[in-house]
Image (tube, grey):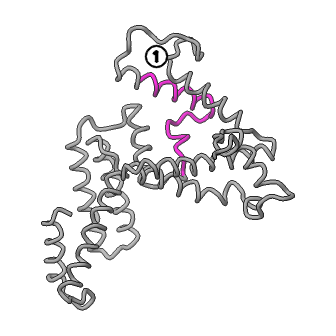
Amino acid sequence: MTTSAQSARHGLDDLRQLMKRLRAPEGGCPWDRQQTYASILPHTLEEAYEVADAIERQDFMQLKDELGDLLFQVIFYAQLAAEEQRFDLDDIIDNLVAKLLRRHPHVFPDGTLASDAVTDPLPEAEIKLRWEEIKAEERAEKSAISSVLDDVPHALPALNRAHKLQKRAASVGFDWFEWMPVRQKLLEELDEIDEARALGDQDAMEDELGDVLFSCVNLARHLKIDPDKALRRANNKFERRFRRVEQLAEAGHINMQGSSLEVLDQLWNQAKQEGL
């Protein structure tokens, strides 16, 4: 028989209480007690990527679990800040709701949850433009420096940060109008790598390769492709094909380490022909 205690669902308050217990000086968890903002940051990034992985695999049971892990990271930061009397979870939620009300005037014209939505829906382009205008106003309020790049986090993965920097610059008109000049710029950057390589200048090669990668991100943006998603897709494709190459090599009694590139390339092409 299932008791009422067993069937009761846990809520947000339970999670907050659990976090307090974990951090309690007496009776808490030694590992949780010694953590700081910086020490749990790598876990936060890892959990975010695990959420992305579950979504891309459409594994929704796993997604539920990974979202819980990501939520726990927020609860952890909130508890650390509450202990230092900086802010708590209620402050985080209050700030978030206020910001979203402010950024969605087409849904909440009075800036309150009780306000009625606009009867005539605005075009999506106009909504996006207003969203960027509101974010620009918020940035101006936060900083005396009026650069549109001010709050692009330095801690973002380089690929994501390049994309965000480019979008932010494009918001004030610093951008090409179409994708072909971006493609041409990419080819120019590749030529500059060749020049640096010919000179044997390792530092210049690194610099020019960075420009190539930055141009690839720019091309992806103009083609309306998420560069990080595209690269993860390429990683997954490579992994599938390489694993198949390993299987084919084993089945053919081929020593991969002792084989020529031509032999391995034949196995690779076979894996491709199999649709992997």
Amino acid type assigned to the residue bearing label 1 in the image: His
Locate residue 15: give its quadrant.
top right
Task: Check the image and report above or below for 177 versus 41.
Answer: above
Residue 39 % position (x, y): 67, 60
Region rendered in magenta: 129-154
Q: Residue at x 63, y 32 (%)?
A: 142
Task: Check the image and report above or below for 30 versus 150.
Answer: below
For label 1, the residue is: 106
Query: SS for tag 1?
Result: loop
Question: Does the stretch in magenta take in 135?
Answer: yes
Q: Residue at x 38, y 9 (%)?
A: 120
Residue 12 % position (x, y): 67, 39
Please indicate whether residue 174 sits to the left or right of residue 147 in the image.
Answer: left
Locate residue 27: give its quadrant.
bottom right
- Counting labels gives 1
Mark 1 is surrounded, within 10 Å at the Cα level, by few (under 14), some (14 to 19) or many (20 or more) other residues, namely many
Locate residue 118: give its quadrant.
top left
Q: Residue furthest top?
A: 119
Q: Residue furthest right?
A: 26
Please indicate whether residue 156 sits to the left or right of residue 180 in the image.
Answer: right
Task: Check the image and report above or below for 221 versus 33.
Answer: above
Q: Residue at x 61, y 31 (%)?
A: 96
Residue 140 % position (x, y): 58, 29
Q: Residue at x 71, y 33 (%)?
A: 91
Which image quarter is the C terminus in?
bottom left
72 or 219, which is in the foreground?
72
Please indicate whether residue 259 sits to the left or right of residue 91 in the image.
Answer: left
228 or 188, which is in the foreground?
228
